Amino acid sequence: MPRGNRHQLPGYVWHLTSRCHRQRFLLKFARDRRDWVSWLFEARKRFGLCVLDYQVTCNHIHLVVIDRGNGEVGRSMQLVEGCIARAYNRRKDRRGSFWEDCYHATAVDSEGHLANCLVYVDLNMVRAGVVDHPSRWRWAGYHEIQQPRDRYRIVDRTVLCELLGVDESRLARVHRDW
């Protein structure tokens, strides 16, 4: 199997995906999905990762980020994926790969396609038939875009608004209407 695309081009918006080994449902427990989100917050804090949206499913993740050119994307993915894999393998007394391969990165045109990418990420579990609305899946950036948190923020709403050309007071309504 070919290795995933991993480019480091500053200023680009990237849609990152990472699948569990052999597409197994290794993230099926809420605890593991919650831990993934916690490590994403830690990566944002440690490395300054600029997160625009995310989604943790039962067998893969989606992450929309901006590469600011400081190596924060690669270091963040290494931190999050490594910590989740080690904790899961230790808890389950398991050996071997947790992730299928390194993350796959796809560049996103920040003008025309960013909104479509956000909708694609937010509707992932709806398309899978797990929930009927993105608000019903807890482990996603959808909630932070709709109602910003006071603490433990992951999604950078200010940068997201700049890229979308939307006033921050209108972001939730525009996002919901998509």
Image (cartoon, rainbow, N blue to C red):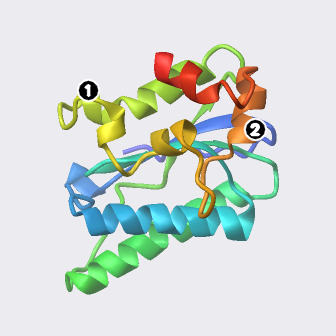
Q: Evaluate if marks 1 and 2 touch, with contact meaning CB atoms under 8 Å apart.
A: no
126 to 3, vertically: above or below:
above
SS assignment at label 2: helix
**Total number of numbered discs in the rendering:** 2
Q: Nearer the viewer, residue 89 or 2?
A: 89
Q: Is residue 128 visible?
A: yes
93 to 167, vertically: above or below:
below
SS assignment at label 1: helix
Res 129 → quadrant: top left
Say which amino acid is labelled 1.
Arg
Q: Which residue is mark 1?
A: 127
Label 1 crowd bin: few (<14), some (14–19), many (20+), radius 10 Å: few
Residue drawn where x is 54% and y is 62% of the image: 40
Left or right: 123, with 50 as reference point: left
Say which amino acid is labelled 2.
Val
Please provide percent x and percent y for residue 79: 56, 70
Please provide percent x and percent y for residue 61: 40, 48
Q: Which residue is mark 2?
A: 159
Gap in Å between the C-alphas at discs 1 and 2? 27 Å
Residue drawn where x is 36% and y is 60% of the image: 99
Residue drawn where x is 30% and y is 30% of the image: 133
Left or right: 29, with 34 as reference point: left
- Badge number at residue 152: none
Residue drawn where x is 51% and y is 68% of the image: 39
N-terminal of the pair, mark 1 or mark 2, is 1
Label 2 crowd bin: few (<14), some (14–19), many (20+), radius 10 Å: some
Quadrant (top left, top right, bottom left, bottom right) of the N terminus: top left
Please provide percent x and percent y for residue 6: 60, 46
